[in-house]
Amino acid sequence: MPLTAGALAPDFELADETGQTVRLAEARGIAPVVLVFFPLAFSRTCEGELRALRDHRAIFADAGAQVLGVSVDSKFALRAWAEEQRFGFPLLSDFWPHGEVARAYGAFLEERGHAARATFAIDGDGVVRASFATAPGEARSLDQYREALGALRSA
């Protein structure tokens, strides 16, 4: 079961698509984070979702929030995908230990071996202010993101 509003977001340290280390704790006190777990790079639904985030990045900028995508793909696969799609936000590799961060957020699908489509809006103090997930194969909507960003603003 995914973490819900009010939970302290588990800290993590993951490599992004360029090999740079990203720690959630580094954002504390600086900016809110929208943590976007997705199943797999190069898949149709994931690509559509992340393109929508790229194409509507202003809604995140207006909230002062940083988007971080997370999947179990290797940093190499994520880099190829990021270069192809030019997402404009970091893609983090939860490759090894396999899905450890997704598990910490209650967003790992054991039977499928990858993360669910789950999103967590985390404020500058590291508290989850909103979370939502969709069923396998079902894309998240921009309205869901807008609602989560609203929860960040009112926190």
Image (cartoon, helix red, strand yellow):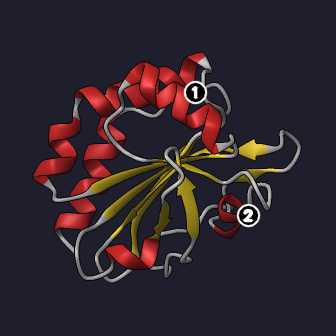
Residue 73 lies, in percent from the top left, at: 68, 40
Task: Pick the quarter of the image with the N terminus.
Answer: bottom right
User: In the depicted view, which residue is nearer to us: 61 or 83?
Assistant: 83
Answer above or below: position of 11 versus 42. below
Q: Residue at x 77, y 57 (%)?
A: 96
Answer above or below: position of 112 versus 41. below
Answer left or right for 8 relative to 137. left
Q: Residue at x 50, y 75 (%)?
A: 9
Q: Dividing the picture into quarters, in which one does residue 42 lie?
A: top right
| Label 2: how many Cα within 10 Å (few below 14, some 14–19, many 20+) | some
Q: Dividing the picture into quarters, in which one does residue 80 lie?
A: top right
Q: Secondary structure at mark 1?
A: loop
Q: Secondary structure at mark 2?
A: helix
Residue lying furthest top in this view? 44
Q: Which mark is residue 138?
A: 1
Residue 14 lies, in percent from the top left, at: 58, 62
Q: Is residue 23 visible?
A: yes
Q: Residue at x 41, y 21 (%)?
A: 85
User: In the depicted view, which residue is nearer to us: 148 or 103?
Assistant: 103
